[in-house]
Structures are given as structure tokens and as C-alpha cells.
């Protein structure tokens, strides 16, 4: 499609590269930015610039950070000796929102995927082993995604961590609250039954 402005076309092209943003949504966003108050557009531009300049990776846990170590690693109120291993920084946000975990995190920055050429050396696995050794970790909670890659990663980590004298646990999976059993897939139901506990 031809637009009356090459700058508009360029903006739409850039916006459409964002995850879950198609051409139509990118077009709507671009036209919104043309209509909105100039200050709002400048604030968005500054926020994007700041995140690229000021936000990095915590050298200790691998989460996003503005300081070294990040605010979660620096929080002395968090329970020492327990690490929750996740794939990406967004997973930290999800676990934190639950309010159910008060230990520390380790972000792998991906999952094992031999078909995509992602092996153990491409993830922050070596750093995990080092933390287990240096920080007197007693439990590692594997909270990788319930995908083929996440399961393979959890299995690999379990095999390599049990020999290090640390308890390795896996987050439970099953039927979500508010869901109908008849709409659940077989794997989810099987895991829910396997992970059942006494009431």
C-alpha cells in the first residue's frame, strides 16, 4: 500500500516488526501517533530511547536491570538459598505477580532447542551451576515453560543439578482455575492427575 508520506510508511514498517503487531495494527498506531498530542509522542520516543540506553542485564541473575546487581538480587528480605529458574525476564514478572515466591531468580535467556541450534552454551546454564556452588543454594525450582523446549531444558538441568547436592523441583502444571475439564487437553489433564495432592 502506498502512503502519502514515506515517514509514515517507515513508521508503519517498524511498528509491524514488533511481536503480535500486524500491518493493520501498526497502521492504526502510526495514525494515532500522528493525531496525539506532540508531548505524548515525544514522551514515548524518550521512553524507548531510555530503555535502550539505561536498561541492561543483571550480571548475577540475568534479569533486566538498571543497576548491578538488580533490585531483586539486592533485596535482603528475599529468601536466600532458593533459586527459581525461568527462561526469560517476562517470566520473572509473571512469577512476581503471583506473590507466591520470595526467593531469588535465575534467567536462562532462552530454552534448549537443538533444531534451532540452541545448546547449553547458548544459555546462562554455566552461570546457574556457578551460583548453586557459590551461593549455598539448597533448592532450585525449574519454572521453564511447558513446551517441548522448556521440558527438555528442565530435564537437562535436573540431570546436571541432582549430582551437585541440591534439591531440584519443578513447578506444578495442570487445569487452570475457572477452566472446564472437558475443554482441557489430555496432556494437561494427565499432568494435573500426576501432580494431585491431599486436601
Image (cartoon, rainbow, N blue to C red):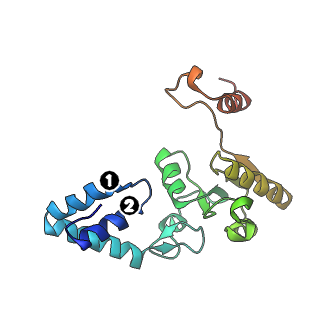
* Up-down relation of residue 76 to residue 57 (above or below): above
Q: Residue at x 38, y 72 (%)?
A: 51
Residue at which label 2 appears: 16
Say which element carries label 1. Answer: helix
Q: Count of labels shown?
A: 2
* Up-down relation of residue 110 to residue 67 (above or below): above
Q: Is residue 82 in sight in this rendering? A: yes
Say which element carries label 2. Answer: helix
Of the numbered discs 2 and 1, the one sitting upstream in the chain is 2
Q: Position of residue 34 (x, y in %)?
A: 18, 64
Residue that protrudes farthest toward the bottom in the picture: 53
- Left or right placement of residue 108 versus residue 23 in this view: right
* Up-down relation of residue 187 to residue 143 (above or below): above
Residue that protrudes farthest toward the right in the picture: 163
Q: Position of residue 180 (x, y in %)?
A: 54, 22
Residue at which label 1 appears: 25
Few, some or many residues within 10 Å of mark 2 (<14, 14–19, 20+) = some
Q: Position of residue 142 (x, y in %)?
A: 68, 51
- Left or right placement of residue 77 versus residue 149 in this view: left
Q: Residue at x 62, y 61 (%)?
A: 110
Q: Residue at x 51, y 76 (%)?
A: 68
Q: Residue at x 25, y 68 (%)?
A: 8
Few, some or many residues within 10 Å of mark 1 (<14, 14–19, 20+) = some
Q: Are marks 2 and 1 in contact (CB under 8 Å)?
A: yes
Q: Nearer the viewer, residue 22 or 164?
A: 22
Q: Which mark is residue 193?
A: none
Quadrant housing the N terminus: bottom left
Amino acid at each position: 500500500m502506498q502512503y502519502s508520506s514515506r515517514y509514515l510508511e517507515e513508521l508503519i514498517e517498524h511498528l509491524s516488526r514488533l511481536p503480535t503487531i500486524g500491518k493493520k495494527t501498526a497502521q492504526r498506531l502510526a495514525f494515532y501517533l500522528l493525531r496525539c498530542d506532540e508531548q505524548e509522542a515525544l514522551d514515548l520516543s524518550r521512553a524507548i530511547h531510555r530503555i535502550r540506553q539505561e536498561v541492561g542485564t543483571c550480571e548475577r541473575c540475568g534479569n533486566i536491570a538498571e543497576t548491578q546487581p538488580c533490585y531483586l538480587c539486592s533485596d535482603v528480605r528475599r529468601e536466600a538459598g532458593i533459586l527459581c529458574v525461568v527462561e526469560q525476564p517476562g517470566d520473572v514478572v509473571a512469577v512476581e505477580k503471583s506473590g507466591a515466591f520470595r526467593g531469588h531468580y535465575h534467567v536462562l535467556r532462552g530454552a534448549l532447542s537443538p533444531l534451532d541450534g540452541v545448546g547449553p552454551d547458548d544459555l546462562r546454564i554455566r552461570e546457574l551451576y556457578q551460583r548453586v556452588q557459590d551461593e549455598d543454594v539448597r533448592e532450585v525450582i525449574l519454572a521453564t515453560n511447558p513446551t517441548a523446549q522448556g521440558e527438555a531444558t528442565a530435564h537437562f538441568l535436573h540431570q546436571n543439578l541432582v549430582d551437585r547436592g541440591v534439591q531440584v523441583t519443578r513447578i506444578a502444571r495442570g487445569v487452570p482455575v475457572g477452566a472446564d475439564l472437558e475443554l482441557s487437553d489430555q496432556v494437561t489433564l494427565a499432568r494435573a492427575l500426576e501432580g494431585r495432592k491431599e486436601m
